[in-house]
Amino acid sequence: MRTDVKICGLKTREAVETAVSLGASHTGFIFFPKSPRHIEPDDAGAIAAAARGRAKIVAVTVDADNDALDEIVSGLSPDMLQLHGSESPDRVLTIKAVYGLPVIKALSVSDSGDLKRIDAYLGIADRFLFDAKPPKGADLPGGNGVAFDWRLLAALDEGVDYMLSGGLNAGNIAEALALTRARAVDISSGVESAPGVKDPALMRDFFAALRRAEAAIDTTGDER
């Protein structure tokens, strides 16, 4: 198997270049001032040049209004938008119509009931991202370094296209893939030496562990 990998919360050209050179399929740039990974649109556009044409460029937003999205799309020229807030299905449809870009809709998961929320977005969102619900009192909807019970995803229809996120790192990616057979993963804090600071060594460790996990699944012959 070959897994799509989004390295999210990139803030430097070096981090972008490292991510792409290691095999990232997607690069994520966060536009949410409360996040230590927040970046201004023009700055993101400058460093995303290292990924353009080599990996998908994803703008990550949280309940952004049209004025904010205008600025982000103008500055970054993303390939995709990731909506990580409480955006309704109607809001997702509006954003797709206005900007003409595919959308990843993030949903927070803590129990099986949370997965039922995807029904309203089927046929609207182009891909889902399942993240752990943030800890009580957290300021961030994602990037908190916590995982959810991956076994919950066994109930999903195999046709649901999603990225697995939340607490992933080199130490647990093999277990995550073995349990879920996720075709795509998203990682941020798991490759950081400090909040918002991507660590090249941790990125290399993650990709090495990921490739070993993929090879192990291929050997068993039971890839989804």
Image (tube, rainbow, N blue to C red):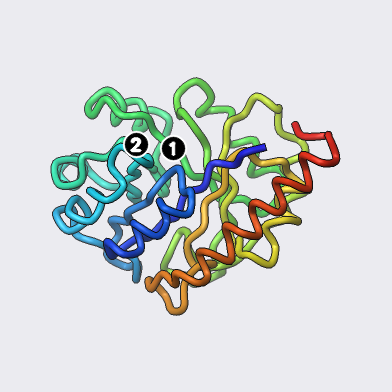
Quarter holding the N terminus is: top right
Please tell me whether residue 144 is drawn above or below residue 53 in the rendered image. below
Q: Earlier in the sequence, mark 2 or mark 1?
A: 2
Please tell me whether residue 71 is drawn above or below residue 221 in the rendered image. below
The residue singled out by tag 2 in the image is: 80
Estimate the x, y position of residue 47 in percent, counting from the top left: 23, 56
Estimate the x, y position of residue 10 in percent, counting from the top left: 35, 60
What residue do we see at 53% from left, 24% from top? 122
Estimate the x, y position of residue 71 in percent, counting from the top left: 14, 46
Determine whether, in the image, residue 154 is placed left or right of residue 37: right
Packing grade of label 1 (10 A; few <14, some 14-19, many >=20) is many
The residue singled out by tag 1 in the image is: 104
Packing grade of label 2 (10 A; few <14, some 14-19, many >=20) is many
Q: CA distance from mark 2 to mark 1?
A: 7 Å
Question: SS for tag 2?
Answer: strand
Estimate the x, y position of residue 62 in percent, counting from the top left: 35, 51
